[in-house]
Image: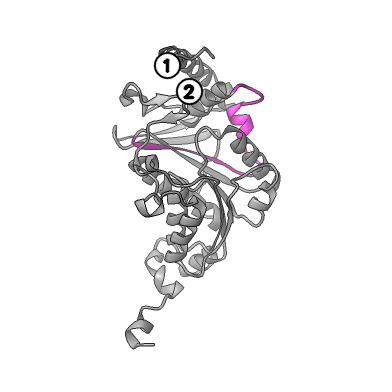
C-alpha cells in the first residue's frame, strides 16, 4: 500500500477528534460502545442516523420498510437520483458505514411491528423516533415497548421551519399518559399528536392553504426542519447515552421555530388532559373538520 493510502486509513480517534471539547475523550469512548435504535430512515430518521454516526456512536438498530422515491428529494438525507427505488435502510446503513467503517448496524427492513419490537430495542441505550407522522400504531407499540424495557426515548418533530421535541424516560410520564390516544380513531390521534407535540403552535401562523391533505396522509415539509430535528434529537440522545446534563422529559417539551425566530418551553401536567391542551384540541378539531370539508371528506 502506498504511503499516501496508509495516511488516509480510517482511525476512530482521529475521525471523531473534533468532538473532543464538547465531549471528553472518555465520553467519546463510551459513545463508541453505545447503541441507538432508530425507527424510520427517511426525513428525520436518516439524518438522525448520520448525525449520531458523526458523533461516533458505535451501533445502531435501524428500521424502515420503504424505498426512496422522488417526493423524498426535498428533505431526506439518502434521497438521490442514484438511490431511487432502493430500500432506505440499506442506503442509510451504507452512508453511515462510509462515515465509520467500524459501526455495527442491524437493519429491520420490515419496519417495526409487534413481532420484532423487542429485538429492535434489545441492547439499545436510547430510542430515537424517526417514524412517519401517520404511523400511529407502530409509534404506540414502540413507545409501549420502550416503557416496558426501560429504554429512554426522544422525539423531535419537523414542523414548518422548526422543531418540536419531547423526551420520555423510564419512571417518567409515558407516551400514552401524555397523548391519551386510547382506542381513538386515527384522525383524532393525529390531532392529539400534533397538539401534544407542539403546545405552543409556533408553526401554525405561516402554513399556506393546501399544505396538508389528510385524505392522502400528506403534509408539507422542509429540509431545514429535518436538519433542526437531527440537531435536537441527537443532542438529547447523546445526553441520555452519556447520562450527562438535564433531561427535560414529558410533560415538559420545547419548540423552536427558525422562521419566526422563537423558542418556547412548554409544561403540560396531565399532557393532553391539561385544560389548555383540551381547548387546543377542540380548536384543532374545528379546523380539521373545515379542511376535511374542503377536501371532500367527512367529519371527526
Bounds of the magenta segment: 161-185
Q: Which residue is outermost to the bottom?
A: 2
State if disc 2 and disc 1 touch (CB < 8 Å): yes
Q: Secondary structure at mark 2?
A: loop
Which residue is the site of mark 2?
A: 215
Q: Judge whether residue 162 is colored magenta.
A: yes
Circle number at residue 295: 1
**In the figure, 186 relative to 162: above or below?**
above
Return the x and y of residue 249 as percentages of the image width and height: 54, 40
Residue drawn at 40 percent across, 66 percent down = 20
**Residue at x 45%, y 49% (from the top left corner):** 85
Mark 2 residue crowding within 10 angstroms, few (<14) / some (14–19) / many (20+): few
Vertical side of 147 occupied by 200: above or below: above
Q: Where 200 sits versus 225, above or below?
A: above
Mark sitting earlier along the chain (1/2): 2
Look at the image and tell me whether residue 235 can be seen.
Answer: no
Front residue of 212/231: it is 212
Q: Position of residue 72 (x, y in %)?
A: 39, 42
Quarter of the image holding residue 263? top left
Q: Nearer the viewer, residue 266 or 198?
A: 198
Residue 107's spot in the image, x, y percent?
A: 58, 56
Name the residue at the front extreme. Answer: 85
**What scheme was used to colour the molecule?**
one colour
Task: Classify residue 160 as left or right of residue 89.
Answer: left
Residue 128 horizontal side relative to residue 23, left or right: right
Amino acid at each position: 500500500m502506498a504511503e499516501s493510502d496508509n495516511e488516509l486509513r480510517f482511525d476512530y480517534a482521529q475521525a471523531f477528534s473534533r468532538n473532543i471539547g464538547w465531549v471528553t475523550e472518555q465520553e467519546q469512548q463510551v459513545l463508541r460502545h453505545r447503541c441507538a435504535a432508530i425507527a424510520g430512515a427517511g426525513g428525520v430518521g436518516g439524518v438522525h442516523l448520520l448525525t449520531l454516526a458523526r458523533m461516533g456512536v458505535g451501533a445502531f438498530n435501524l428500521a424502515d420498510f420503504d424505498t426512496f422515491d422522488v417526493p423524498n428529494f426535498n428533505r431526506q438525507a439518502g434521497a438521490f437520483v442514484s438511490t431511487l427505488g432502493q430500500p432506505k435502510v440499506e442506503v442509510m446503513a451504507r452512508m453511515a458505514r462510509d462515515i465509520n467503517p467500524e459501526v455495527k448496524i442491524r437493519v429491520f427492513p420490515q419496519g417495526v411491528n409487534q413481532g420484532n419490537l423487542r429485538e429492535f430495542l434489545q441492547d439499545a441505550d436510547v430510542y430515537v423516533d424517526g417514524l412517519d407522522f401517520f404511523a400511529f400504531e407502530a409509534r404506540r407499540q414502540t413507545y409501549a415497548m420502550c416503557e416496558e424495557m426501560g429504554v429512554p426515548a426522544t422525539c423531535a418533530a419537523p414542523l414548518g421551519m422548526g422543531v418540536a421535541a419531547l423526551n420520555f424516560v423510564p419512571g417518567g410520564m409515558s407516551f400514552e399518559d401524555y397523548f391519551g390516544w386510547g382506542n381513538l380513531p386515527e384522525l383524532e390521534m393525529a390531532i392529539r399528536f400534533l397538539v401534544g407535540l407542539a403546545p405552543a403552535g409556533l408553526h401554525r401562523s405561516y402554513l399556506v392553504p393546501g399544505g396538508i391533505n389528510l385524505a392522502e396522509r400528506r403534509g408539507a415539509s422542509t429540509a431545514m426542519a429535518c436538519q433542526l430535528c437531527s440537531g435536537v434529537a441527537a443532542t438529547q440522545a447523546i445526553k441520555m447515552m452519556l447520562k450527562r446534563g438535564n433531561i427535560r422529559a414529558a410533560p415538559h417539551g420545547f419548540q423552536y421555530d427558525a422562521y419566526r425566530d422563537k423558542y418556547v418551553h412548554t409544561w403540560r401536567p396531565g399532557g393532553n388532559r391539561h385544560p389548555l391542551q383540551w381547548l387546543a384540541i377542540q380548536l384543532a378539531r374545528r379546523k380539521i373538520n373545515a379542511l376535511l370539508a374542503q377536501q371532500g371528506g367527512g367529519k371527526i
